[in-house]
Image: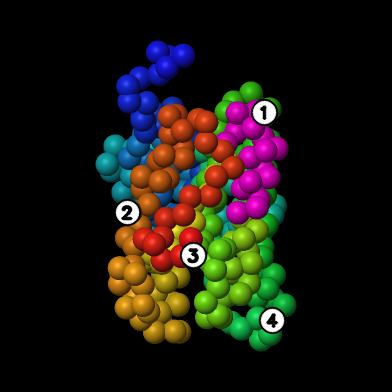
Amino acid sequence: MTDAFPLPNASTDLGGQVALVTGATSGLGLRFARVLAAAGAAVAAAGRRRERLDALVSEITGAGGNALGVELDVTDPEAIPEAIDAAERALGTVTIAVNCAGIPDAQRAHKMSLELIDRVLDTNVRAPYLVSCEVARRLIAAGLPGRIVNISSMAAFEYGGNGAALYSISKAAVNRMTEVLAVEWVRYGINVNAIAPGAFSSEMMDGMMARVGDFTGALPRKRLGDPAQLDSTLLYLVAPSSEFVTGTVVKVDDGQGPR
């Protein structure tokens, strides 16, 4: 049976794939859009800030890649299928979806307004669910396999009491979403996995440090991660060679979290 696979079976060539990345105007979403394009995928970069989308598309196409910027506020449920329509008209059926859009709560639980509660849950939980379902629906109709990667957080597994209770709750929901949707869609060849990063450099992390101070000295290796250190995990989960992996949450945290 192993003769059917190359040695080693580790290709990350995404040629012929179409990838949708939400939250692509900053942080991990921006990095992941670049990475997927560099691996050969046509990338639909989705986000709210048009000028940043235009800059990203210019960068990718200037390097020989294929990309489209799609304005999308993931808290608007009607905008999600419209954004995917736009991506598919330009690039073809979306076969890879990476749900990167996310926001912190940055307040104590008992002080949060209902508006903020709704915004966090709409962005961090409802949006990846709706994006995943919309992409899966189209893949099933087309009879195509696909890959969905959700961005979780080590906050799903631990909470330091730093004013991020709802964020932690939302990322725990992302983990369970990943597991159950993997079971739901495995028969269709759609793999659903998640990455749970620890403390990585990003706009969100900059905001957290502005609130609570520099905590890197308390980390095991006294450093933040660089988003580039997540490239290999992302590519592993979307690569042809990881076709047997689904329903998994991969922790990438430099030993920061509980074991």
Image check: 37 left or right of 118? Answer: left
Q: Is residue 138 visible?
A: no
Marks 4 and 2, how far apart in space?
35 Å
Q: Which residue is mark 1?
A: 187
Marks 1 and 3, how far apart in space?
33 Å
Residue 48 horizontal/vertical position (percent)? 52, 60
Marks 4 and 1, how far apart in space?
41 Å
Q: Nearer the viewer, mark 4 or mark 3?
A: 3
Marks 4 and 3, how far apart in space?
31 Å
Q: Which residue is mark 2?
A: 228
First reached walking from the N terminus: tag 4 or tag 3: 4
Cβ atoms under marks 1 and 2 closer than 8 Å: no
Say which mark, if any, is on residue 24.
Answer: none
Q: Which residue is mark 4?
A: 113
Residue type at numbered disc 1: Arg
Q: Is residue 175 visible?
A: yes
Residue type at numbered disc 3: Pro
> What residue appears at the point 59 percent right and 42 percent down from the top-left corner?
247
Instruction: Give neighbour class at mark 2: few <14, some 14-19, many 20+ (Cα, 10 Å).
Output: few
Image check: 170 left or right of 65? Answer: right
> What residue appears at the point 48 percent right and 43 percent down from the top-left corner?
44
Residue type at numbered disc 2: Ala
First reached walking from the N terminus: tag 1 or tag 2: 1
Q: Nearer the viewer, mark 2 or mark 3?
A: 3
Q: Secondary structure under badge 2? A: helix
